[in-house]
Amino acid sequence: MAIDGIVLVHGGFHGAWCWERLLPHLEGPVLAVDLPGRGKHPADMAEVTVEACVRSVISDMDAAGLGRVLLVGHSLGGATVPVVAARVPERIAHLVLLSCILAPEEGAILDAFPDETRELARRRLGDSEGAETEMSEQHHRELIGDELDGEILRSVLDRVGPDSRHLFTDRASRAGLPDDLPRTYIRLKRDLAVPWELQERMICLLPSLRIAQIDAGHNVMLSQPQALAAVLNEIVRST
């Protein structure tokens, strides 16, 4: 059965803008969504919960007239896209997790980290009691590494913004996600934000994943858009 399009869900501190260099290389209709709290969906970060993100993605799919889709999540988008797939499984032709952070079933994203990494993540979230959290430019540079430079790097650093702690701490359920729903995890060999070992840990949290691999860093959609498009287009053709 053919699909109606590709839906792209960005990761933490990013927005739909992060897919710009990828879009020209994808086949068929594409919808790059802004999660609540950024871009087309401004919101108080106190209201940006996992549930709000799930509802927002489904609403954007409805507004775009997309029925059955290839759903792609990147990084912290892993808090949202498996729950979307569990909520409307009949509309998901294939679920793609691009170096995603995942939560244990009925757990939070932070629950999936090993102890030492969990503490590092908590420190990066900061000590504020508010819902909004933001990383410094230096932290963003450390996670990007030497993957991007020049105008592309500057563009990313100028556009990253705050995010919601709720996406790290909210508990959510994937109950309803069919065991036979096709799903792929794309591993990134040089990812500094979600390192190889952490990706392996995430893969163990969701059964029946097919594995693809790209020799790239975390922002592969910006550094190697054609390589990522090749993987996604092949999934579309085979769906």
Image: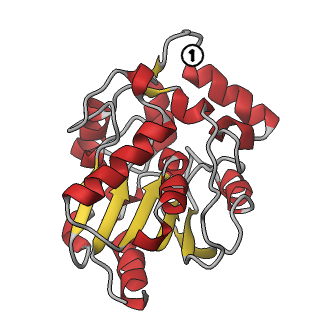
What residue does disc 1 label? 126
The residue depicted at 64 percent of the width and 49 percent of the height is 173
- Which of 55/210 is in front? 55
**Residue 21 visible somewhere in the drawing:** no
Q: How many marks?
A: 1
The residue depicted at 22 percent of the width and 77 percent of the height is 28
Question: Looking at the figure, which quarter contains the N terminus?
Answer: bottom left
**Residue 129 visible somewhere in the drawing:** yes
- x and y percentages locating residue 77 in the rendered image: 47, 49
- x and y percentages locating residue 192 in the rendered image: 56, 46
- Image position of 204 (left or right of 218): right
- x and y percentages locating residue 186 in the rendered image: 54, 67
Q: Looking at the image, is 199 positioned above or below residue 178? A: above
Element type at marker 1?
Answer: loop
| Amino acid type of the residue tagged 1 in the rendering | Gly
Q: Looking at the image, is 143 positioned above or below residue 191? A: above
- Which of 228/237 is in front? 237
- Image position of 190 (left or right of 38): right
- Image position of 55 (left or right of 150): right
- Which of 132/230 is in front? 132
- x and y percentages locating residue 221 in the rendered image: 35, 59
Q: Looking at the image, is 115 positioned above or below residue 237? A: above
Q: In which quarter of the image is residue 26?
A: bottom left
- Which of 215/12 is in front? 12
- Image position of 188 (left or right of 123): left
Q: How crowded is mark 1: few (under 14 residues within 10 Å), some or many (20 or more)?
A: some
